[in-house]
Image: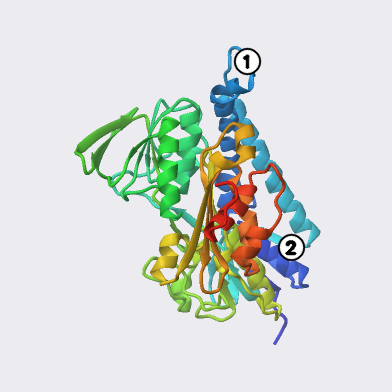
Amino acid sequence: MPKRQYDVAVIGSGPGGYVAAIRSAQLGLKTVCIEKSPTLGGTCLNIGCIPSKALLQSSELYHVLKHEVQEHGIQFDHLGYNFQQMMGRKSQIVESHVKGIAMLFKQHKIVRKEGLARLNSPNLIEITQGTESELLDADSIILATGAHCISLPALPIDERLVLSSTGALSLNKIPKKLLVIGGGAIGLEMASIYSRLGTDVTIVEMLDRIAPAMDNSIGRLLLPILKKQGIKFHLNSKVEKAEIGKEEVTLSIHSPEKKLSLTADAVLVAIGRKPLTTGLGLENLGIQLSPKGFVVVNDSFQTYQDNIYAIGDLIEGPMLAHRASDEGVAVAEIIAGQSPQINYMAIPNIIYTYPEVASVGFTEEEARELGLDLQVGVCSFKANPRARCIGNTDGVVKVIGDEKSGRLIGLHVLGLHASELIGEGVVAIQNQMLLKDLGRTSHGHPTLSEAIKEAALAAQGCAINL
């Protein structure tokens, strides 16, 4: 049989796809990456993680200057912001990252193809761009097409009045009133950006809590903090009807208290994302989808066709960019004959509000459902000297240990720089660290990370500063 054109073909260039392509090339496999968009990086880099974090940083700086620096003796007049400059900075950051991935592809001799990909057979891919098409064949194919926003029937997304996160990151002006449907990570982050910049923001969430993927106690503590920042909430509420006018949208909301009518000049639909499988031709190859639309794979990420793999948002699990990257590396190594392992318990989850929320391992609810006997310790940042010096003591560190094994099985942080602090918990859980060892580990003083040590000690009943 003649040698195929490529050893590996990756469909999609997001955090899962481009990483899978690079790792494949590093392992000596001739690799091609097919991306439907003109730029590499997928949703995360172009219209998701990176641009949202750029705007979150800009709006957070404005919020801190407006509300928190006066107590430090810092005074100024005429504080303002330039929204167009903020958006321009965001675009520059995205562009630099896109160019960086293109350089990495060139460095690793990865062939890049632009167009829509469809599987004609287990080894044959048809790439279409406009009226032109081409065929290429590969020994192994990695599906990494990601996910797209879920819409509501009553609120068709037009990116003008009814927005997805994509539209919310590309507005030309600040909305006066913004309604956000969904109190998860995307909804909370977008609400935070515009609330800080002066928008009247209301979040409508059908559950009785926000941040449902996080530990319940952390979500309960986050809610009043965000309310204090000016964001309004309607929990246990859902949209019953929508009236879309020329310049505004009116929503009829059913809540426990009463039926509400809310009007705004923009509505963000942030109720989740679903796998992007349309047009791939999976049905012709017997590749199955779960009832929720995820591609069905085995423990080695193989589909029904054992040379076709799927990773990231396409398969069941938390829709996180770093999870997709870990899986991209793993699949490349599996194709190369290696036996990598991913510890899903050690994959962190982060919400970039102010303060941030970060979690790794089991929530307390999950651990108790498993019937585990727990050691739980909490340290408020009000007891942390570094947080006091900074001037923001909102939040806590919560540590969860398994009493039988003595191991750390969960770390949850609500507070400044939680996205960075959670790394300690990731390393500890990845290496099956004992709770007592975490409590005995020296932490610099004064640092925010001392709250992790103190919480670990509290879980054992021997806290020093609580």
Most foreground residue, 216 or 293:
216
Decide which of 192, 283 is in the foreground and name it: 192
Q: Which residue is mark 2?
A: 110
Place of residue 437 in the rendered image (x, y in percent of width and height, measured from the top left): 65, 64
Splitting the image into 4 quarters, where does residue 224 fall? top left
- Which quarter of the rendering shows the N terminus? bottom right
Closer-to-camera residue (314/33): 314
Please tell me whether mark 1 or mark 2 is closer to you in this view. Answer: 1
Q: Amino acid at mark 2?
A: Ile
Which label's residue is closer to the chain start, 1 or 2? 1
Query: In the displayed structure, does residue 28 sit left or right of residue 436?
Result: right
Q: Is residue 33 above or below residue 247?
A: below
Horizontal relation, residue 58 to residue 224: left or right: right
Answer yes or no: is residue 134 visible: no
Which residue is drawn at the image coordinates 72% and 47% (left, top)? 444
x and y percentages locating residue 57 in the rendered image: 60, 36
Residue 241 visible to the viewer = yes
Mark 1 = which residue?
Answer: 75
Q: Quadrant of residue 110?
A: bottom right
Mark 1–mark 2 distance (CA, rounded to whole Å) = 53 Å
The residue sitting at 57% across, 19% down in the picture is 80
> Looking at the picture, how far across and down is residue 209, in whole percent?
36, 48
Q: Residue at x 54, y 39 (%)?
A: 382
292 vs 270: above or below: below
Residue 231 vs 366, above or below: the answer is: above
